[in-house]
């Protein structure tokens, strides 16, 4: 059913969301390598939220690649890059990666 005037024109914006469970494999200042049970198309933009040591960290990301792990059933490695939509907050994954990098090198 169409609602005249309500859903017309370029001002209509919509977003679809779904929750996908992932496992963090690697993290760097520019992004993460994740493992999940479904393919995610390159270019997909999402909010990535991870619980690390009892604290929740989150950042906007874009999928740069998604590759099936051969011999692992329905397992995919998904590379994501951080999107710099705003400066990193205290609980951002970018901030976590920066602190982790400093502690490993210093």
Image (cartoon, helix red, strand yellow):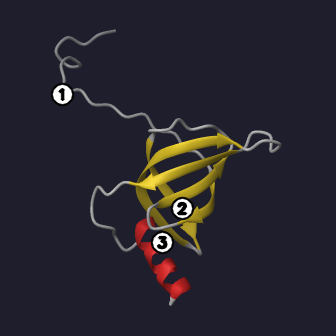
Whole-percent x and y of residue 81? 45, 54
Nearer the observer: mark 2 or 3; the answer is: 3
Whole-percent x and y of residue 49? 49, 58
Q: Is residue 68 visible?
A: yes
Locate residue 100 relative to residue 1 in the image: left or right.
right
Q: Earlier in the sequence, mark 2 or mark 3?
A: 2
SS class, disc 3: helix
Q: Which residue in the protein does label 1 denote?
A: 11
Q: Quadrant of the N terminus?
A: top left
- Contact check, label 2 and label 1, Cβ < 8 Å: no
Q: Who's the residue at 65% across and 38% down the image? A: 38
Marks 2/1: CA–CA distance: 33 Å
**Which residue lies most toward the front here?**
105
SS class, disc 2: strand
- Contact check, label 2 and label 3, Cβ < 8 Å: no
Nearer the observer: mark 3 or 1; the answer is: 3
Figure quadrant of residue 73? top right
Q: Which residue in the protein does label 2 denote?
A: 50
Q: Earlier in the sequence, mark 2 or mark 1?
A: 1
Q: Is residue 92 visible?
A: no
Whole-percent x and y of residue 22? 62, 52
Marks 2/3: CA–CA distance: 12 Å
**Is residue 99 placed above or below 67 in the rendered structure?**
below
Q: Which residue in the protein does label 3 denote?
A: 97
Q: Who's the residue at 37% across and 34% down the image? A: 15
Locate residue 5 relative to residue 86 in the image: left or right.
left
């Amino acid at each position: 059913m169409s609602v005249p005037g309500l859903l017309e024109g370029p001002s209509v914006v919509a977003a679809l969301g779904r929750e996908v469970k992932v496992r963090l494999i690697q993290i760097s200042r520019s992004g993460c390598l994740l493992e999940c049970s479904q393919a995610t198309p390159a270019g997909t933009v999402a909010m990535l939220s991870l619980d690390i040591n009892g604290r929740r960290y989150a950042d906007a990301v874009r999928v740069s690649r998604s590759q099936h792990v051969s011999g692992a059933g329905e397992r995919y490695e998904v590379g994501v890059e951080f999107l710099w939509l705003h400066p990193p907050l205290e609980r951002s994954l970018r901030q976590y990666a920066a602190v982790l990098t400093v502690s490993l090198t210093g």
